[in-house]
Image (tube, rainbow, N blue to C red):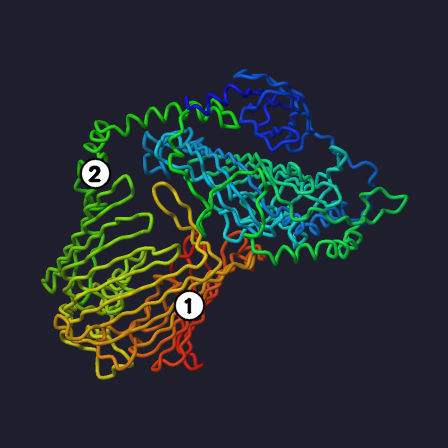
Amino acid sequence: MPLFLAVLTAQAGIVRGKITDPKGEPLAFANVAVRGSATSTASNDQGSYQLRLDAGQYEMVFQYVGFKPRVEKVTVAAGDTATVLNVTLTPENYNLGEVLIRASDRDPAYAIVQHAIDWRKYHRAEVAAFTARMYIKSIIRLTDVPGKIMGLVKVGPDIKPGVVYLSESVSDMTFRQPNKIQERMISSRVSGSSKGFSFNRASKNFNFYDNLLQSGFSERGFVSPVAQNAMQFYRYELVGASQQNGITINKIRVTPRHRIDPAFSGFIYIAEDGTWRLHSLDLSLGSNSGIEYVDNMRVEILYAPAPGHPQAWIIQSQKVSLSAGGLGFKGNGSINAVLSNYRVTPTYPNPPVVAATPPPANEPAHRETVAEAKQQRPQLRVATRSIRREARTKAQEEIPLPEGGVALAPMPKGQVMLIEKGANERDVAYWDSIRPIPLSEEEVKDYRVKDSVEVIEKSKPYQDSMDRIRNKPSFFGVLVGGYTYSNTYRRRFITVDSPTDKMVYNTVEGLVVNLNATFLQRYEDRRSYSLEPALRYGFSSKQFSPSLRGGYTFRPESFSRVGFAVGRTILDFDPYNNQPHTPFNAPLLNTTYTLLANRNYNKYYQRDGVELTYRTEAFNGFFVNLGAGYADRRELYNTTAELIRDVPGRAFTPNQPEAAELPQGTGFGRSRAVTVDIGLNWQPGQKYVTRPDGKFNLYNSRYPRLSLGLRQGLRNVLGSDVRFTRLELGVQKEVGFGLFGETRLSGTAGTYLGTPDLTFIDYRHFAGNRTALAISFEQQFQLLDNYRYSTAQRYVVGHFSHHFNGFFFNKLPAFRQLKWQEVATLNYLYTPTAGQYAELGVGVEHIFKILRVDYFTALQAGERLNSGIRIGIGF
């Protein structure tokens, strides 16, 4: 046992017991705190709790949402002795007293909630900074498993009811206004994965003083019951009031005003302490509220005065419970968080005192109206405006952390979380000493079984035996899904793709078969290298096109990688069409239109050469991409006119793109090119998590992403016959508008410097589309001919889309049930030849959860060109 544990054991004792209701039923996740200190814990699923305390006398406060708090005195002896203290909590008696409500009156709850809304901004900012320790336990279970999925696919024997995921973590965290959180995970445990790290994040607490809460289970978020516009989304009912420590606590039932509103159902408890704050809450979301991926979510939060600063309240505990089902599977889970060791710097050392509007002498207090509540707003604004103004002028680094709190070493800018090296190497004795919530019997069993099984499953004999079973090929399996040879112990894999996976057809090569394989070697430190040989054969052109590409990731923490590609490839003139988009891609769409509609839209050329690439993150958010290549390009011609369905009067077009800037034709015969590429991408304010096995970017900055690209063609180097310089500047940004949806913007401006001498291959192309299927609604023009406005001059490209996330459709009963969402799109292009070209689109996404259908109209120089419907993926 480590020395610090031995010392801890000698000086501290344990208080443990069980918390139940009057019927003897356990109260899961009840809060247990030591009065006058920052020490707290919670009960587990069976109502059991434990707390390690130094020897002495204490007053322990037991609380559960909707129950009367109970204070018990306890004496803790020194040494590893246990004091048993079982506690029964009784439900709080919330009564309405002498409230008289006429039919024409609003429920008294509205006045109380209006007070809470008026004080919302105050409470959101009342803690300037804090430090705390947070313990989080996450568990996911399967409760029902079908024998077959949809009656067709048999479920394997390894999938059975029980715990799927169990993890614990302990983190030290700091918070500074307005929303700067830094976290250091000091210990992590994942059942059955000794090398794994927990996904728990201390920064994932809900803040119900925000107008809109983002849960990760909905694109549009959910409205808080005390949001500024909450009255538009909620109905309120005063259930009753009770007295706790001399403060009146109002229990208010909240329900969505409309069944499909993005709103919670349940209870909020508001304290009449002069500032109308949230005391606790118990709220739920169901399928009608627009929640996705899960069926139900329940949030339970208990607030408490900060130790030493009772004018500022903090979250003491939070529990999120989830349940879900689909395809015959059912499951549930929970995330339990307990915060302790709080140290707080309050924003308002002297909170404002606002005089309450007294009720008429013959009326009880709860007859106060919303109008009367609003009379207090000017007083509140005057009392807090100057304090807020002063707080806003201070940089968040100037806000001092409280003395005596958790001492975190300074973190680099942008780093929001650090998982310490060795965090997943803590032994059982450590966890028994630091874990504030006792494990349940189910959790103890899961750790014991999975940790034992892991030892066996990671041994070489076991992995070799499993590989022998997995590595047996079958003809049908190879034909449909390919084949993978695994050496799991050495982290070595060889994958051969299915020969039918990338089988396509075009008029240049005829039927094309692509045989691809990948050799991958991974290392424990996340370094890796790969080799990808490929053989392409066109049955009509009778031409083999062999190639080899590979790469080595040598510094995972900075995403540093070198790569190469060598050999012969057949490529589309537009680089966008050579990317492996899914599920629709340009070769597949071209195959369909070629064989069934006499439309060979895509045009190809042959490239023989070599390319070298290098990528790294020079500093946080700033990526450098370098490339250099030599290419011998040759023009290709149609070799076949075979098809499945012949459209009378329609013939295939030559394999030569038509471009407005080259009316004499785009043919080039043969061209050699040596090119150098420099790409700089910068995401200012990028946040990231550092783990012992690497860096993980979160991509949630409030600043736009910027890019700068240079492509240089070098004449007379290795026989190169092109000379050009292309500069390009790009910007991307996503902007959220709460319930009104999200806007996505991307813009690019570029130019060719001087007088370029180049082929059509080296023109800037613009991802057009002439099919009914859209590869991408965000990056592609939907009515633009594939190559018509490709340019070697200056250009501006813009893509704008706004996803309303059901803002309008949710107000229409039929669409509300379908859960469809509306979207608007604007695509813009300017070149000297094209002039002002724009596409306007309106559409519907989330059809059958994954489909999107848009109607587009193209305009050029203010005149309408054409229109069309596009179908793609939208979820």
The residue that disc 2 covers is 486
Residue 638 in the image: state x and y as whole percent.
Answer: 15, 70
Tell me the quarter of the picture where residue 58 sits. top right
Give above or below for 527 relative to 786.
Answer: above
* Residue displayed at 37% across by 31% down: 425
Could you classify mark 2 by the number of other residues whose Cα lies within 10 Å: few (under 14), some (14-19), or many (20 or more)?
many
Residue under numbered circle 1: 799
Q: Residue furthest bottom?
A: 664
The N terminus lies in which quarter of the figure? top left
Residue sitting farthest toward the left: 542
639 horizontally vs 214: left or right: left
Disc 2 to disc 1, C-alpha distance: 43 Å
Q: Quadrant of residue 362?
A: top right
Q: Secondary structure at mark 1?
A: strand
Can residue 735 be seen here? The reply is yes
Report x, y in % for residue 676: 23, 67
Mark 2: which secondary structure?
strand
Q: Earlier in the sequence, mark 2 or mark 1?
A: 2
Tag 1: residue type?
His
